[in-house]
Amino acid sequence: FPGNTQSQKTEIEREEENDYTIATTISRVRQVVKANDTEAVLGRTIHGFTVFFDDENRGLNTAIQAGAQFLPDVIPELKGSENSVNSNINRHLFLAANNTRLPSNSFTIYSAGVGRAKSLTPDVTSLSEVPKGSYHSIWLGLSPKIDRSINEGRTFYDPTGPQLAIASAGAEGGAESNVELESAVNQDTFSTANLQDFYAQVYLSFLQQDANFVRESIYREETSYYPHVSFTGNWTGTQDVLRYYTGAIASEEVKFYLGADYTKSTVNGWSFRGGAIGYINPDRDYYSQIFGNVAKRFRISKNANLTFSTFFNYAIDRDTRIGDTVNNSPASELAASARLNWRIASVGVTYYFGDILPNSFEDRLLLEFSIRPLKTVTFSGYVAPVDETSNRSIYGASVTWRLNNKYNSPTLSLNWQNQEYDYGQDPFGNNLIVNDNTFTVLFRMGKPAR
């Protein structure tokens, strides 16, 4: 804090520590497909077991996962027929199974679902006539719950200069002088007025020393995993997908939710998506929201296209408190964007409109680009020339290398991100800004699930 003879500036130092735990997951998948002369059915079962080497709920989570291994596989029922089987199975059957909603950042313990779709017949002559497929499932897994806290750390003075005497005074004398004093020794009080023979010496010096007043504030996040059960389903067609989902997260305060979303695309390049989800007992990670987007794609040539889009997300009841501290972290957004894809390159621009939706991000202009010189290598970067949020990333870059050009090939990613934290101004009007550079190396096996 400012106020000594050496400086009138405030300095902020930010230190971030991350403690990771090792997690190992083993999964087995069984898929059964049956078909008759009119339709086909699909049964998909996933058994997973994840071991956390350091987790608050490790005992409970391990017991639930062990018991879930005995849950049955799904064998779909389908009546036989006298006619021969129709091998033209509707691809919407498999797309519907892949379109099932999986809770984000979660680990699957057990998932069981059944899909159904009418098979293709000779009278189907266009994509719009292909029957829809459906898939309905139950999902049991572990989802993260982040506990946040803000606490005061050490508070102390850190000397930065020598001690200087700014004033000195003193006196001494005995019973015949005009020295008067009182003293306390071992809870006994003595006064010169009651003493007949004494001699006193009293000298004082006032010192001045420059020092920095240091105050620590500690923000801590601790992630634990809790059981989560979800029921979800969807109807998938050639141009649209309708999904529903409901479930509960068994954290200290059980969180129930219900939601749905709808996606529609047209043959002339339009796409629409809208949805909503509502929570009981919301917090900073799981909260009610309404979202949607509209996009239009223009084909410029065989190797180029231009897409314009607008999207929004309205966070309704996100928790704004961390303990007793009010912390309004933005979650709503309204934006418009454009992207040009040409051969191996892509350029995009997005503008976020601030202060329109409640608890929204501030104004931000984001420019992005990427280039893929090889089928297995991609370079990308971004810069934000306008960003009025207090926690912002001004620029960054990454390179991604897929070790082989296959769907489940291992991928190595190198990422760099410049992060800026704006803490406002000190009492003298000095800006309090901290700048960090973050480098990340990620090695991933397999294609991540949507």
Image (cartoon, grey):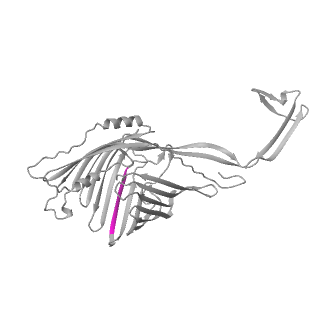
Residue 249 place in picture, x, y as percent: 36, 42
Residue 427 place in picture, x, y as percent: 63, 55
Q: Is residue 130 visible?
A: yes
Residue 155 higher or lower than 269, as above or below: above
Residue lying at the far front of the rendered structure: 404
Place residue 291 in its image quadrant. Answer: bottom left
Residue 76 place in picture, x, y as percent: 20, 45
- Identify which residue is drawn at 34% across, 50% down: 277
Q: Does the magenta portion include 346?
A: no
Residue 373 place in picture, x, y as percent: 42, 66
- Identify which residue is drawn at 41% across, 37% down: 58
Q: Nearer the viewer, residue 392 or 409?
A: 409
Residue 375 higher or lower than 37, as above or below: below
| Left or right of residue 363: residue 242 | left
| Left or right of residue 174: residue 406 | left
| Left or right of residue 347: residue 166 | right
Q: Is residue 229 visible?
A: no
Residue 157 higher or lower than 378, as above or below: above
Magenta segment main secondary structure: strand
Q: Nearer the viewer, residue 379 or 193?
A: 379
Place residue 253 in its image quadrant. Answer: top left
Q: Nearer the viewer, residue 157 or 171?
A: 157
- Identify which residue is drawn at 88% across, 36% down: 172
Place residue 275 in its image quadrant. Answer: bottom left
Segment tinted magenta in the rendering: 288-297
Q: Nearer the viewer, residue 143 or 257?
A: 143
- Identify which residue is drawn at 83% across, 39% down: 203
Residue lying at the far left of the rendered structure: 82
